[in-house]
Structures are given as structure tokens and as C-alpha cells.
Image (tube, helix red, strand yellow):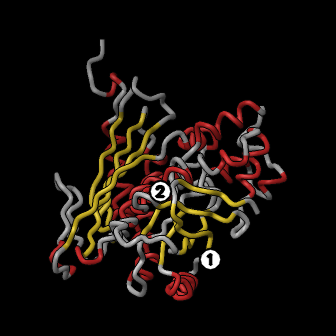
Amino acid sequence: MAKSYEESGVNLEAGYEVVSRIKKHVKSTERRGSMGNIGSFGGMFDLGSLGYEHPILVSGTDGVGTKLKIAFASGIHDTIGIDAVAMCVNDVLAQGAEPLVFLDYVAVGKNHPEVVEAIVAGVAEGCRQAGCALVGGETAEMPGMYDEDEYDIAGFTVGAVEKSKLIDCSKVSVGDVLVGIPSTGVHSNGFSLVRKIVADNSLSFSDVLPETGCQTLGEMLLTPTRIYVKPVLALLKEVDVHGLAHITGGGFDENIPRILKDGQGVEVEEGSWEILPVFRLLEKYGKVPHREMFNIFNMGIGMVLAVNPADVEKTIEVLSAQGEKPVVIGRVIEGEGVTIIPA
């Protein structure tokens, strides 16, 4: 019979060590509005310090899905936190909001402080990339719920945007040009299929394949999701962007129509951007129909913007100055759905 919490599988001392280890990572994310309240029961942020006249709060929450399974198998834990941040902040960015705060939830089967620190270090890196403050979180040790070497992570963010600058897609018009911003890879969606393709072909995440270059397959697949916050916020100061689509689960077919009005569709010109090697690999080994790939994955484009044709040159200029490689990938048309024009 268990006589202590530790005998039931929960190590309180390891929990205290985690708190000690992650403090420096949390502190590294402080920004204007931060109130330095780690350790309080609730995370606080001074919205009034930012000077909004009529702020609209935009919130988002998400996880990383079964991409975690590849982290477990590869022993790479310091990028998955970036994914958790990216999935949340890129979503609120799609409404034009600046992410302000982030909270994380990490549940583990057994508390390995060095692993939890690596996860939270990734979260902090994602927050720094997004310019938002990590104001709190929770680490839960849950023996019996997860295996000892497994964990789950989810995140939550709140952003703000002036009401007059909220992107609600009401301005999207037939004739608008679609500008795509490249992804870094698969990002954080479609990994149930990815893992099935790997298993069905008896591949290992430690394999080095022609498509992976000098990386292992696991390293390629764990490339963290790109965070678009800083370049897109810089663009929104210069250009009246009509719509923003974060290309996540459901690929082009599910996400681009979310920014359209009734009676509108899009034409996307394949060949106008580079389809990354990881997608060629998945299509080849998974024998996935080429058109279906666009219904599952981002195919090398992580964010799509709809802008007036007169603003295309400025859009390319501003994003390029921010270190991005934007490309014109298509246009808004009368109709419905997503038409992929073959290269």
C-alpha cells in the first residue's frame, strides 16, 4: 500500500527542481506589459501600458498532436515547445492581433526535470520569436495516464488588436492577390499520416535518406513550426492586408477558404514556390495522390495573405526586408473552393 505521494509515482522534489530550472527561461520572455509575477496563482499583464484606444482581445489554444511521438522516438525535446507557441500565436495573428501572453501546460508520465526544462526552453524560444511573455503554466506529473517517457503539451495565448485594424476578411475581394510565406516543413499537422508512412515503409527516424540531406528523418520532421508574428506585424503597419490564412490541419483546402466570403474561391499556381523535399518524400513513400497532399499538408507555404493587387509590390518588399521569402501564389476568383493549377 502506498504511504506517500512519491510511492504513488509523483516526485515532488523533481517538481521543485523543474520550477527552479525554468525560471531563467520564463524571465527571458519578459516584454513591455509584463508584471514579473511568476509564482502567483494567475499570470498578469498590463494591457493599459500598450496604449490601445479600443483593444480587441484575440485568444487561441492548441497542442502539437502526434508530432510528439517523433520527439519521444528521437529523444529531441527542445523544439516541440516552439511548435506549441507557433500553433497558437500564428492563429491569433491571422486576425491581425499581436500576441501578448502565453501559458503552457505540460503533462508527464514521470517528471524528468532535464526533459521538462528542454520543453519549456523551447516554449520560451517560441515566445521570444513571437514577442510575447510567458506569464505562467502548469506541469502535471500523471503516472498511469502517460508512460514514463511520454508527455503532452498544450498552449494558450491572448493577443490584442485595435478594433479598427481587426482582420475579419470583410475586405477580401475577387481579384485580390494571394501572397504566400514559406513554411519550414510539415509544421505541426498531418503527423498521424506521417507516422503511418514511416511505419508502413519500415523506416526509422534515425535514417538518413536522399531527401533528408545531412539530417536524420527525425530531425527533418521535428523542424519547428515557423512563427510569422514579427514579419507580419511589420507588414500590417505598412499594408492594408485583407485576409490572413494560417495553413494548418486541412492544408490549402480547409484553411484558405476561411478568409473568403460566399461566392469566392481561389486559384493557386503550383510551381510558383518551392515544394520542400519533405513533402516529396511523404508523397513518394506514402503513395499519396498529389492533389490530396494539398488537402493535408502546407506543401511549403505556412501563411497566405490576400492583398489588393496595388499592394503586392509593397507586401513583397516589407516581408523581404524582414528576412522572409514571400511569393505570389495565386488570386481570389468568383466561385468556390481551392483550384490548384498544375505547374
The quarter of the picture where residue 48 lies is bottom left
The quarter of the picture where residue 73 lies is top right
Nearer the viewer's eye, disc 2 or disc 1? Answer: 2
Judging depth in this view, the residue of 69 and 37 nearest the camera is 69
Judging depth in this view, the residue of 74 and 272 nearest the camera is 272
Q: x%, y% of residue 314?
A: 52, 88
Q: Are marks 2 and 1 in contact (CB under 8 Å)?
A: no
Question: Going by the picture, which residue comes out furthest to the right?
Answer: 210
Q: Which residue is disc 1 drawn over? A: 325
Judging depth in this view, the residue of 72 and 118 nearest the camera is 72
Q: Which residue is disc 2 drawn over? A: 257
Residue plotted at (39% across, 49% down): 62
Image quarter where the C terminus lies is bottom right
Residue plotted at (49% across, 35% down): 150
Q: What secondary structure is marked by label 1?
A: loop
Image quarter where the N terminus lies is top left
Label 1 amino acid?
Answer: Lys
Q: Is residue 216 left or right of residue 303?
A: right
Residue plotted at (79% across, 58% down): 214
Judging depth in this view, the residue of 11 and 249 nearest the camera is 249
Residue plotted at (72% across, 42% down): 289
Q: x%, y% of residue 177?
A: 54, 74
